[in-house]
Amino acid sequence: MIQLQSPYDMHLHLRDGEMLQNVAKYTAKYFSGALVMPNLTPPITSIELALSYKERIQNACGDCDFNPLMSLYLTEELNKSVLEKAREVGIVFLKLYPKGATTGSESGVSKVLDNKILEILEISQELGMFLSIHGESNGFSLDREVEFHPVFRELAESFPRLKIIFEHLSDHRSIALVEKYDNLFATLTLHHIALSLDDVLGGGLNPHHFCKPILKTPKDRDALLEVALNAHSKFSFGSDSAPHLRENKECAKGAAGIFSAPLALLGLAELFEKHNKLENLQSFVSDNARRIYDLPKTNKIIKLVKAPFEVPQEFNGIVPLFAGKTLAWNYA
Protein backbone atom coordinates (compact mmCIF):
# COMPACT_ATOMS: atom_id res chain seq x y z
CA MET A 1 0.00 0.00 0.00
CA ILE A 2 1.05 3.59 -0.69
CA GLN A 3 -0.19 6.49 1.42
CA LEU A 4 -0.02 9.93 -0.20
CA GLN A 5 -0.40 12.89 2.14
CA SER A 6 -2.00 16.04 0.68
CA PRO A 7 -1.59 15.39 -3.06
CA TYR A 8 -1.94 18.51 -5.22
CA ASP A 9 -2.64 18.89 -8.93
CA MET A 10 -1.08 22.18 -10.00
CA HIS A 11 -2.61 22.39 -13.49
CA LEU A 12 -6.22 21.35 -14.04
CA HIS A 13 -9.06 22.06 -16.46
CA LEU A 14 -12.57 21.58 -15.06
CA ARG A 15 -14.59 23.33 -17.78
CA ASP A 16 -18.07 24.51 -16.75
CA GLY A 17 -21.73 23.55 -16.84
CA GLU A 18 -22.53 19.88 -17.31
CA MET A 19 -18.89 19.02 -18.00
CA LEU A 20 -17.84 20.54 -14.68
CA GLN A 21 -20.51 18.52 -12.90
CA ASN A 22 -19.22 15.34 -14.53
CA VAL A 23 -15.47 15.73 -14.01
CA ALA A 24 -14.84 17.75 -10.83
CA LYS A 25 -15.45 14.80 -8.51
CA TYR A 26 -12.53 12.82 -9.89
CA THR A 27 -9.99 15.41 -8.80
CA ALA A 28 -11.82 16.45 -5.64
CA LYS A 29 -11.88 12.89 -4.36
CA TYR A 30 -8.17 12.19 -4.78
CA PHE A 31 -6.46 15.57 -4.32
CA SER A 32 -6.32 18.14 -1.53
CA GLY A 33 -6.41 20.96 -4.03
CA ALA A 34 -5.74 21.92 -7.62
CA LEU A 35 -4.82 25.02 -9.58
CA VAL A 36 -7.82 25.54 -11.88
CA MET A 37 -7.18 27.06 -15.30
CA PRO A 38 -9.22 30.16 -16.29
CA ASN A 39 -9.56 29.59 -20.06
CA LEU A 40 -13.33 29.22 -20.12
CA THR A 41 -15.62 30.87 -22.65
CA PRO A 42 -15.70 33.69 -21.68
CA PRO A 43 -12.39 33.53 -19.78
CA ILE A 44 -12.06 34.21 -16.04
CA THR A 45 -10.71 37.76 -16.27
CA SER A 46 -12.13 39.30 -13.09
CA ILE A 47 -12.35 38.60 -9.37
CA GLU A 48 -16.11 38.31 -9.61
CA LEU A 49 -15.92 35.71 -12.36
CA ALA A 50 -13.26 33.76 -10.43
CA LEU A 51 -15.26 33.67 -7.19
CA SER A 52 -18.43 32.70 -9.03
CA TYR A 53 -16.57 29.90 -10.80
CA LYS A 54 -15.07 28.73 -7.52
CA GLU A 55 -18.56 28.47 -6.05
CA ARG A 56 -19.72 26.36 -8.99
CA ILE A 57 -16.68 24.11 -8.60
CA GLN A 58 -17.30 23.64 -4.89
CA ASN A 59 -20.94 22.78 -5.57
CA ALA A 60 -19.85 20.22 -8.16
CA CYS A 61 -17.39 18.67 -5.68
CA GLY A 62 -20.07 18.08 -3.05
CA ASP A 63 -18.75 17.05 0.35
CA CYS A 64 -15.21 16.34 -0.82
CA ASP A 65 -12.42 17.98 1.19
CA PHE A 66 -10.96 19.89 -1.75
CA ASN A 67 -9.62 23.40 -2.31
CA PRO A 68 -9.86 24.80 -5.85
CA LEU A 69 -7.06 27.33 -6.28
CA MET A 70 -8.35 30.03 -8.59
CA SER A 71 -6.42 31.93 -11.23
CA LEU A 72 -7.04 35.04 -13.30
CA TYR A 73 -6.66 35.08 -17.07
CA LEU A 74 -3.98 37.70 -17.73
CA THR A 75 -5.16 40.57 -19.91
CA GLU A 76 -4.07 44.18 -20.33
CA GLU A 77 -7.14 45.30 -18.37
CA LEU A 78 -5.70 44.12 -15.04
CA ASN A 79 -4.41 46.87 -12.77
CA LYS A 80 -3.02 47.41 -9.28
CA SER A 81 -6.42 47.84 -7.65
CA VAL A 82 -7.76 44.59 -9.10
CA LEU A 83 -4.61 42.66 -8.23
CA GLU A 84 -4.63 43.95 -4.66
CA LYS A 85 -8.25 42.90 -4.23
CA ALA A 86 -7.49 39.52 -5.78
CA ARG A 87 -4.69 39.01 -3.29
CA GLU A 88 -7.03 39.91 -0.43
CA VAL A 89 -9.54 37.21 -1.41
CA GLY A 90 -6.85 34.57 -1.89
CA ILE A 91 -6.45 34.66 -5.67
CA VAL A 92 -2.68 34.69 -6.16
CA PHE A 93 -2.26 33.07 -9.59
CA LEU A 94 -2.16 34.80 -12.96
CA LYS A 95 -2.28 32.65 -16.10
CA LEU A 96 -0.59 33.96 -19.22
CA TYR A 97 -1.75 32.53 -22.54
CA PRO A 98 0.03 33.67 -25.71
CA LYS A 99 -2.79 34.55 -28.08
CA GLY A 100 -3.82 31.57 -30.22
CA ALA A 101 -1.38 29.10 -28.65
CA THR A 102 -3.90 26.65 -27.19
CA THR A 103 -7.53 25.96 -26.26
CA GLY A 104 -9.28 29.10 -25.01
CA SER A 105 -6.37 31.43 -25.80
CA GLU A 106 -8.23 33.68 -28.22
CA SER A 107 -8.27 36.42 -25.57
CA GLY A 108 -4.60 35.84 -24.72
CA VAL A 109 -1.65 38.20 -24.87
CA SER A 110 -0.41 39.20 -28.33
CA LYS A 111 2.85 40.74 -27.10
CA VAL A 112 4.05 39.23 -23.84
CA LEU A 113 6.83 41.79 -23.39
CA ASP A 114 4.51 44.74 -24.00
CA ASN A 115 4.95 47.60 -21.51
CA LYS A 116 1.45 47.18 -20.09
CA ILE A 117 1.99 43.47 -19.43
CA LEU A 118 5.36 44.19 -17.82
CA GLU A 119 3.71 46.78 -15.59
CA ILE A 120 1.14 44.19 -14.45
CA LEU A 121 3.93 41.71 -13.71
CA GLU A 122 5.85 44.29 -11.69
CA ILE A 123 2.79 44.81 -9.50
CA SER A 124 2.29 41.04 -9.24
CA GLN A 125 5.88 40.66 -8.08
CA GLU A 126 5.39 43.25 -5.35
CA LEU A 127 2.21 41.50 -4.19
CA GLY A 128 3.88 38.09 -4.04
CA MET A 129 1.71 36.51 -6.72
CA PHE A 130 2.50 33.65 -9.10
CA LEU A 131 2.73 33.80 -12.87
CA SER A 132 1.79 30.58 -14.67
CA ILE A 133 2.66 30.51 -18.37
CA HIS A 134 1.63 28.37 -21.30
CA GLY A 135 5.05 28.75 -22.87
CA GLU A 136 4.67 28.25 -26.59
CA SER A 137 5.13 30.31 -29.73
CA ASN A 138 2.97 29.96 -32.82
CA GLY A 139 5.78 28.32 -34.81
CA PHE A 140 6.49 24.71 -35.81
CA SER A 141 4.69 22.49 -33.30
CA LEU A 142 7.74 20.57 -32.06
CA ASP A 143 9.78 23.74 -31.54
CA ARG A 144 7.16 26.07 -30.07
CA GLU A 145 8.28 25.53 -26.48
CA VAL A 146 11.95 26.18 -27.20
CA GLU A 147 11.06 29.21 -29.32
CA PHE A 148 9.42 30.66 -26.21
CA HIS A 149 12.57 30.32 -24.09
CA PRO A 150 13.72 33.94 -24.67
CA VAL A 151 10.48 35.17 -23.11
CA PHE A 152 11.02 33.04 -20.01
CA ARG A 153 14.59 34.34 -19.75
CA GLU A 154 13.50 37.95 -20.06
CA LEU A 155 10.77 37.59 -17.46
CA ALA A 156 12.90 35.60 -15.01
CA GLU A 157 15.67 38.20 -15.18
CA SER A 158 13.37 41.23 -15.12
CA PHE A 159 11.30 40.00 -12.16
CA PRO A 160 13.65 37.99 -9.93
CA ARG A 161 11.18 37.95 -7.00
CA LEU A 162 8.23 36.78 -9.08
CA LYS A 163 7.69 33.03 -9.02
CA ILE A 164 7.17 31.98 -12.64
CA ILE A 165 5.73 28.58 -13.49
CA PHE A 166 6.63 26.89 -16.77
CA GLU A 167 3.39 24.97 -17.24
CA HIS A 168 3.28 21.42 -18.64
CA LEU A 169 6.95 21.44 -19.67
CA SER A 170 7.32 19.01 -22.57
CA ASP A 171 10.74 19.45 -24.20
CA HIS A 172 13.98 18.11 -22.70
CA ARG A 173 15.71 21.35 -23.70
CA SER A 174 13.53 23.25 -21.24
CA ILE A 175 14.84 21.46 -18.15
CA ALA A 176 18.14 23.37 -18.06
CA LEU A 177 16.27 26.66 -18.41
CA VAL A 178 14.20 25.93 -15.31
CA GLU A 179 17.33 24.95 -13.40
CA LYS A 180 19.12 28.16 -14.38
CA TYR A 181 16.79 30.64 -12.69
CA ASP A 182 15.96 30.61 -8.98
CA ASN A 183 12.47 32.00 -9.62
CA LEU A 184 11.52 29.63 -12.44
CA PHE A 185 9.65 26.40 -11.69
CA ALA A 186 7.67 23.91 -13.77
CA THR A 187 4.85 21.39 -13.78
CA LEU A 188 4.95 17.98 -15.46
CA THR A 189 1.99 15.95 -16.69
CA LEU A 190 1.48 12.20 -16.59
CA HIS A 191 1.03 12.04 -20.35
CA HIS A 192 4.26 13.89 -21.16
CA ILE A 193 6.31 11.54 -18.97
CA ALA A 194 4.53 8.38 -20.18
CA LEU A 195 3.88 8.93 -23.90
CA SER A 196 5.57 10.22 -27.05
CA LEU A 197 4.48 11.44 -30.48
CA ASP A 198 4.31 7.80 -31.61
CA ASP A 199 1.31 7.41 -29.32
CA VAL A 200 -0.46 10.05 -31.40
CA LEU A 201 0.70 9.04 -34.88
CA GLY A 202 2.76 5.86 -34.78
CA GLY A 203 -0.01 3.31 -35.12
CA GLY A 204 -2.58 5.42 -36.90
CA LEU A 205 -4.01 8.70 -35.71
CA ASN A 206 -5.15 8.66 -32.07
CA PRO A 207 -6.95 11.97 -31.43
CA HIS A 208 -7.33 11.17 -27.73
CA HIS A 209 -3.57 11.58 -27.33
CA PHE A 210 -3.55 14.96 -29.08
CA CYS A 211 -2.73 17.77 -26.67
CA LYS A 212 -0.91 21.09 -26.47
CA PRO A 213 1.97 21.22 -25.99
CA ILE A 214 2.11 18.25 -28.30
CA LEU A 215 3.68 14.98 -27.15
CA LYS A 216 7.28 14.92 -28.32
CA THR A 217 10.12 12.47 -28.90
CA PRO A 218 11.08 9.46 -26.76
CA LYS A 219 14.16 11.47 -25.76
CA ASP A 220 11.95 14.23 -24.40
CA ARG A 221 9.65 11.79 -22.63
CA ASP A 222 12.53 9.95 -20.99
CA ALA A 223 14.27 13.13 -19.83
CA LEU A 224 11.08 14.46 -18.28
CA LEU A 225 10.37 11.09 -16.69
CA GLU A 226 13.80 11.12 -15.08
CA VAL A 227 13.07 14.55 -13.59
CA ALA A 228 9.76 13.33 -12.19
CA LEU A 229 11.13 10.04 -10.85
CA ASN A 230 13.80 11.88 -8.91
CA ALA A 231 11.26 14.42 -7.61
CA HIS A 232 13.42 17.32 -8.79
CA SER A 233 12.78 20.13 -6.30
CA LYS A 234 11.78 22.67 -8.98
CA PHE A 235 9.12 20.46 -10.57
CA SER A 236 5.69 19.48 -9.30
CA PHE A 237 2.81 17.46 -10.67
CA GLY A 238 0.23 19.20 -12.83
CA SER A 239 -2.04 16.81 -14.69
CA ASP A 240 -3.26 19.25 -17.35
CA SER A 241 -6.29 16.98 -17.35
CA ALA A 242 -8.40 18.54 -20.08
CA PRO A 243 -11.73 16.85 -20.81
CA HIS A 244 -13.41 16.97 -24.22
CA LEU A 245 -16.37 14.91 -25.37
CA ARG A 246 -15.50 12.07 -27.73
CA GLU A 247 -17.21 13.76 -30.70
CA ASN A 248 -15.08 16.88 -30.22
CA LYS A 249 -11.90 14.80 -30.27
CA GLU A 250 -12.89 12.54 -33.16
CA CYS A 251 -13.68 15.28 -35.67
CA ALA A 252 -11.84 17.30 -38.30
CA LYS A 253 -10.59 19.94 -35.86
CA GLY A 254 -9.78 17.49 -33.07
CA ALA A 255 -9.82 19.37 -29.75
CA ALA A 256 -6.50 19.40 -27.88
CA GLY A 257 -6.46 17.86 -24.42
CA ILE A 258 -6.02 14.59 -22.52
CA PHE A 259 -8.35 13.61 -19.68
CA SER A 260 -6.44 11.89 -16.87
CA ALA A 261 -8.07 13.01 -13.62
CA PRO A 262 -9.67 9.68 -12.59
CA LEU A 263 -6.43 7.71 -12.89
CA ALA A 264 -3.58 10.21 -12.57
CA LEU A 265 -2.25 8.95 -9.24
CA LEU A 266 -2.61 5.33 -10.36
CA GLY A 267 -0.65 5.94 -13.56
CA LEU A 268 2.06 7.75 -11.64
CA ALA A 269 2.32 4.94 -9.09
CA GLU A 270 2.76 2.41 -11.89
CA LEU A 271 5.52 4.45 -13.53
CA PHE A 272 7.36 5.16 -10.28
CA GLU A 273 7.18 1.50 -9.22
CA LYS A 274 8.40 0.32 -12.62
CA HIS A 275 11.53 2.44 -12.17
CA ASN A 276 12.00 1.62 -8.46
CA LYS A 277 11.25 5.19 -7.36
CA LEU A 278 8.03 4.81 -5.36
CA GLU A 279 9.69 6.53 -2.41
CA ASN A 280 9.76 9.77 -4.45
CA LEU A 281 6.08 9.83 -5.43
CA GLN A 282 5.04 11.73 -2.30
CA SER A 283 7.47 14.56 -3.08
CA PHE A 284 6.41 14.77 -6.72
CA VAL A 285 2.66 14.92 -6.08
CA SER A 286 2.69 16.91 -2.83
CA ASP A 287 5.82 18.08 -1.05
CA ASN A 288 7.31 20.00 -3.97
CA ALA A 289 4.05 21.81 -4.69
CA ARG A 290 3.52 22.69 -1.04
CA ARG A 291 6.98 24.23 -0.85
CA ILE A 292 6.92 26.03 -4.21
CA TYR A 293 3.40 27.45 -3.84
CA ASP A 294 3.30 27.73 -0.04
CA LEU A 295 0.35 25.36 0.25
CA PRO A 296 -0.91 23.76 3.47
CA LYS A 297 -0.42 20.19 4.55
CA THR A 298 -3.94 18.82 4.90
CA ASN A 299 -5.39 15.81 6.66
CA LYS A 300 -6.23 14.17 3.34
CA ILE A 301 -4.48 10.85 2.81
CA ILE A 302 -5.00 8.90 -0.40
CA LYS A 303 -4.29 5.17 -0.13
CA LEU A 304 -3.28 3.17 -3.19
CA VAL A 305 -3.11 -0.60 -3.23
CA LYS A 306 -1.51 -3.10 -5.59
CA ALA A 307 -4.65 -4.30 -7.35
CA PRO A 308 -5.84 -4.09 -10.97
CA PHE A 309 -7.68 -0.98 -12.15
CA GLU A 310 -9.43 -1.40 -15.47
CA VAL A 311 -9.58 2.01 -17.11
CA PRO A 312 -13.05 2.52 -18.63
CA GLN A 313 -13.40 3.31 -22.32
CA GLU A 314 -15.32 6.44 -21.35
CA PHE A 315 -16.25 8.62 -18.40
CA ASN A 316 -19.51 10.41 -19.25
CA GLY A 317 -18.66 10.53 -22.94
CA ILE A 318 -15.00 11.49 -22.35
CA VAL A 319 -12.28 9.06 -23.44
CA PRO A 320 -9.56 9.00 -20.76
CA LEU A 321 -5.83 8.44 -20.90
CA PHE A 322 -5.06 4.68 -20.98
CA ALA A 323 -8.65 3.88 -22.00
CA GLY A 324 -9.26 0.12 -21.95
CA LYS A 325 -5.95 -0.69 -20.28
CA THR A 326 -5.42 -2.30 -16.89
CA LEU A 327 -3.21 -0.44 -14.42
CA ALA A 328 -1.38 -2.24 -11.66
CA TRP A 329 -2.53 0.09 -8.85
CA ASN A 330 -5.97 0.94 -7.54
CA TYR A 331 -7.56 3.18 -4.93
CA ALA A 332 -7.98 1.57 -1.53
Image (spheres, rainbow, N blue to C red):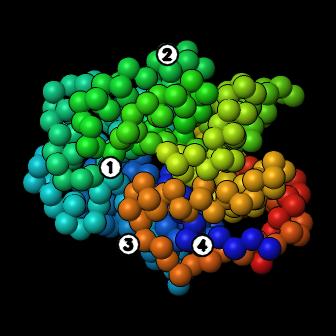
Which of discs 1 and 3 lies nearer the camera? The answer is: 1
Q: CA distance from mark 2 to mark 1?
A: 26 Å
- Disc marking residue 139: 2
Dot 2 falls on a residue whose secondary structure is loop
Q: Nearer the viewer, residue 75 or 329?
A: 329
Dot 3 falls on a residue whose secondary structure is helix
View extreme (bottom): residue: 63
Q: Quadrant of the C terminus?
A: bottom right
| Residue at image location 59% in from the left, 72% down from the top | 5
Viewer can see residue 139: yes
Viewer can see residue 13: no
- Disc marking residue 55: 3
- The type of residue carrying mark 3 is Glu
Q: Quadrant of the N terminus?
A: bottom right
| Residue at image location 48% in from the left, 73% down from the top | 297
Which of discs 4 and 1 lies nearer the camera? The answer is: 4
